[in-house]
Amino acid sequence: PAGEQPLADNSTCEECMRGRYKGPGEHRCQDCLSGRYASLPGSSSCIECSFGFHSGDRSTDCEFDWMYHILTLVAAMAHFVGVFFLSRDLRRGIRIQDISQFGDKAVVTAFKPHGLRPRLSQSCSVRFERTGNRWLDDPSSTF
C-alpha cells in the first residue's frame, strides 16, 4: 500500500518514516527532496513548502527562509532608494554653459554631466530660466 514498504522478508509492511514517502506503484520509501516535506509517518507523497519557506532533503517540515526575506527586503529598499534619487535628480535644474546652433538643431552644453539621455523615438522638452533672454525665459516657451 501507499505510505508503506515491505520488510526484508516480505511478510509484513512498515510505514515510511517522517521525511519519506511511498506513492502508488513504488516499491520502497523515497526521501522527500529539498523544498518538500512529509510530517507524518506513512505518507504517500511529499508536500511542497510554501513560498518563502525551505527544507532540505528528507525533511519533516519547512522552515522560514530568512535569507530569502532579507534579500527581498534589501532589493525592495534599493529599488525605492534608487527611485527616490532618480526622481530627485530629474527635478533638479541643470546649469547650462552654452547654447549654439548646429544646422537645424540647438546644441545645449551643460557645466556638469547630467546623465539624462532622451530616447531616439521621443522628443525632449527643455525650459529655460534666468538666462537674461526674454524669449528663452518665457515660461510658456519649451524647446
Image (cartoon, rainbow, N blue to C red):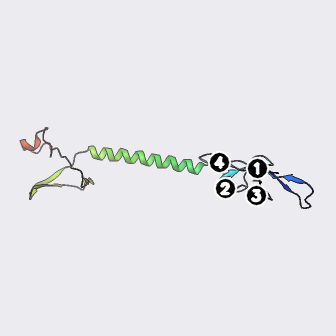
- Label 3: state its secondary structure: strand
Residue under numbered circle 3:
30
Q: Is residue 43 left or right of residue 50?
A: right
Q: Which mark is residue 49?
A: 4
Give the residue at x 77% y 56%. 25
Q: Residues within 10 Å of mark 4 (few under 14, many from 20)?
A: some
Comparing marks 1 and 2, which lies closer to the viewer?
1
Q: Residue at x 42, y 47 (%)?
A: 79
Tell which of 9 and 107 is nearer to you.
9
Q: Are marks 4 and 2 in contact (CB under 8 Å)?
A: no
- Give the spatial CA distance, label 4 vs label 1: 16 Å
In the displayed orientation, state which residue is furthest to the top.
140
Q: CA gap, disc 4 to disc 3? A: 17 Å
Q: Amino acid at mark 2?
A: Ser
The local crowd at label 2, few if under 14, some if 14 to 19, many if 20 or more residues have their Cα within 10 Å, is: some
Q: Amino acid at mark 1?
A: Ser
Q: Amino acid at mark 3?
A: Gln
**What distance separates the C-alpha of mark 3 from that of mark 1?**
10 Å
Q: Looking at the picture, tell me which residue is in the foreground, 30 or 109.
A: 30
Residue denoted by label 1 = 44
The residue type indicated by label 4 comes to Cys
Is 25 displayed left or right of 69 in the figure?
A: right
The picture places residue 70, in percent across and down from the top left corner, at: 54, 48
Distance between mark 3 and mark 2 Cα atoms: 12 Å
The answer to whether the residue labelled 3 contacts the one labelled 1, judged by CB atoms less than 8 Å apart, is no
Q: Residue at x 41, y 45 (%)?
A: 80
